[in-house]
Amino acid sequence: MGKRTTLLATVALPIVSLVWQPVQAAMVRPPIVESGMPHVITVQEGDLSEAEQRKLRRQRQKEQQQQENGEQQGERRKKQRESAEGDDQQQQERQERRKKQREAAQGDEQQQQDRQKAREERRQKQREAEAGDQQQQEDRQKAREERRKKQREAAEGDDQQQQDRQKAREERRQKQREAEAGDQQQQEDRQKAREERRKKQREAAEGDDQQQQDRQKAREERRQKQREAEAGEQQQQDREKAREERRKKQREAAEGDDQQQQDRQKAREERRQKQREAEAGDQQEQDRQKAREERRKKQREAAEDQQREEKKAERPRRKRDENRERIARDPSKTNETIELPFVDGAAVLDSDKDFDNRKGSAREERRRKRAEERENVRVRVPESDRDAQVGWKDRDRVRYESGERERGERRDRRPRYEERDGWRVERQFDDRAVINFGDRIIVRSDDGRRLSRRATETYYEDLPHGRVREVIVRPNGDRVVTIRSRYGDVIQRSRIDRSGSEYVMFYAPEIDRDSRPTFVDPGERLPPMRLTVPVDDYIIDTSSEEERDYRDFLDRPPVEPVERVYTLDEVKYSARIRDKVRRIDLDTITFATGSSEISVNQAATLRKVADAINEILDKDAGETFLIEGHTDAVGSDESNLVLSDERAEAVANILTDVYDIPPENLATQGYGERFLKIDTDSAEQLNRRVTIRRVTALVKPVAMAE
């Protein structure tokens, strides 16, 4: 009785308390009995029967199994809670990330850094969560190993206990396998879910990175567009519409003949045909065409003879000076200043005229000193443009770079260029400015207006180092690209046709590396010009030399070597540099005093010169011609400068409008009364003239270009 009471007190009551405890209490992990410490029940094992001992063992095994199941359930529930908390945490993080993404889409670069930092923190938390999952997995594996170890140690009892324990162990193992299978399945599910979450997170992260890059790119594009279009969305739509129209026109233009030269030739032939047809008279009177043509031909010849006689009567003919004519036939035999071969003729070279006009000592004394300086000057007349630049053979070859090679930022208005040191604007006449610097005054104009008269679009772009790119788009798809320095100097000009071919007119990129705050005449560093070719091979007067081959004359090389590539401004403002190339005096174009208008009859006298220029351009579309305007000495310097510049532009417009010479191949400059042809202060028709020079060898590297 005492044993049973003891057994009831020591075994049954604890079992009942375990069975009837609440569910919440079952989750509490029971104390683990150390294998080396005897349980209170083992004190009575010697007093129990074998059946009671088996029952007690089974009860203990059942208790142990319940304990292990409780532990497993507690661990699973704990993991589930942790997983749910992790999912909630990830959900909250996703929501927070989305919120930050929305905020980041409205923010600037600082918000982008915050999002980057938050993403790094999320990734750190994910790595920590993964490390925690791995640690929990290792802890569970370690706990399972410890349980198995304890089970192996407990299995060292007697045979019956071994069998019972083996059976119980097998049952436990079965349950453990089932539980492990469930855990494994759950683990696989969790692993799969975790992998899916990681995949989604990676995709989200990649999406975030891609979105970030896209947003960064979009932000840059928006900033670019904002800088390019400060006028707003309407201006952007206008540009888009203009681009669409331009593309449409380019596509329409691309349907024609791809060879622009043939188009120009065909257009020229058609224009000539129309002119011949217009001269033929009324097309409806075909039966009288031949007679009318003959009659009109005789009338034209009579009118031309009469007009020629009238011009001869009106135009003052200068008396020829025999001594000057002798010197003009071979100027190389003298060091003296070469003068035009008639009475009151001024110096042949513009640089000599400049020197004669300087203040100080008498002209005779200055000429004597200049002759002494010429005495040791030896000049080699080049045989071609390349031969004129052979002195550059030790320099690096030059590869023309496209005018559109750099990306620019669109401007919404025409640029205003900086003024050079020492330049002072005296007066402003529309788009022309009269500038005073040093001991001279010049007129400066923007030829962009002349080039863009027939353009469908003209826009400007800012480039690095203060440069500006001007792009003029023509109806046929051609683009004229001009790059200028911050002072307005032309660094490069080229025409890009619709097929992508680029023809370069000006190319002096080295001036971009030199700020050149003050203009310095490069001719001041050179010795006095010494003319060694006959004057007739250096100057042509269209009124007296109508039968000359103008194309052959214009195609001839400079009369002395060219030291380097000069900028367009250096050529315009340096008489010494311009003297290197030959010139044609268009004295058949006679201007009224104070006027720059050209009559239709006078425009017709430009045909031979225009045909010669077109033939040269057919051979090389990158040739450049300088048109110079001049006045007589009547009037103020400022008004004469502006008037002469208008005269040069008027001739350039006629060559473009009537004879189809591209305006980008023509440069204009007015010189006022500075370079008189007849040395007189009174009104003189021969001084009111226009001159043409081919300056290609001066403004781009012909010999070094690849």
Image (tube, rainbow, N blue to C red):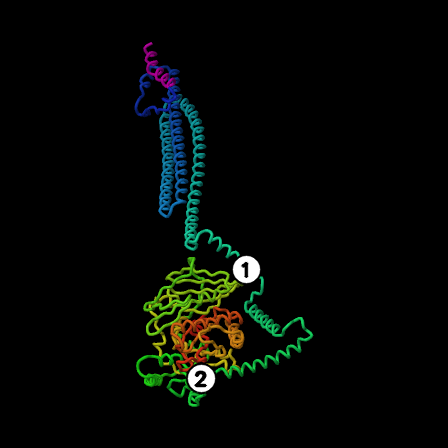
Residue labelled with disc 1:
249
Question: Is 515 on the left-hand or right-hand side of 271?
Answer: left
Locate residue 415: give its quadrant.
bottom left
**Residue 78 visible:** yes
Residue labelled with disc 2:
535
Of marks 1 and 2, which one's residue comes earlier in the chain? 1
Please name whichever residue, 120 or 691, is drawn nearer the observer in this view of the structure: 691
Magenta highlight: main SS: helix
**Residue 567 point in image, percent of width and height:** 40, 70
Q: Residue 637 shows which numbered tag?
A: none
Please name whichever residue, 457 or 346, is drawn nearer the observer in this view of the structure: 346
**Residue 490 visible:** no
**Residue 230 point in image, percent of width and height:** 42, 53
The reply to whether the magenta stretch includes residue 8 is yes
Q: Secondary structure at mark 2?
A: helix
Please name whichever residue, 512 or 681, is drawn nearer the observer in this view of the structure: 681
Magenta stretch in the rendered image = 1-21
Q: Residues within 10 Å of mark 1 (few under 14, many from 20)?
A: some
Q: Give the CA separation, mark 1 to mark 2.
A: 49 Å
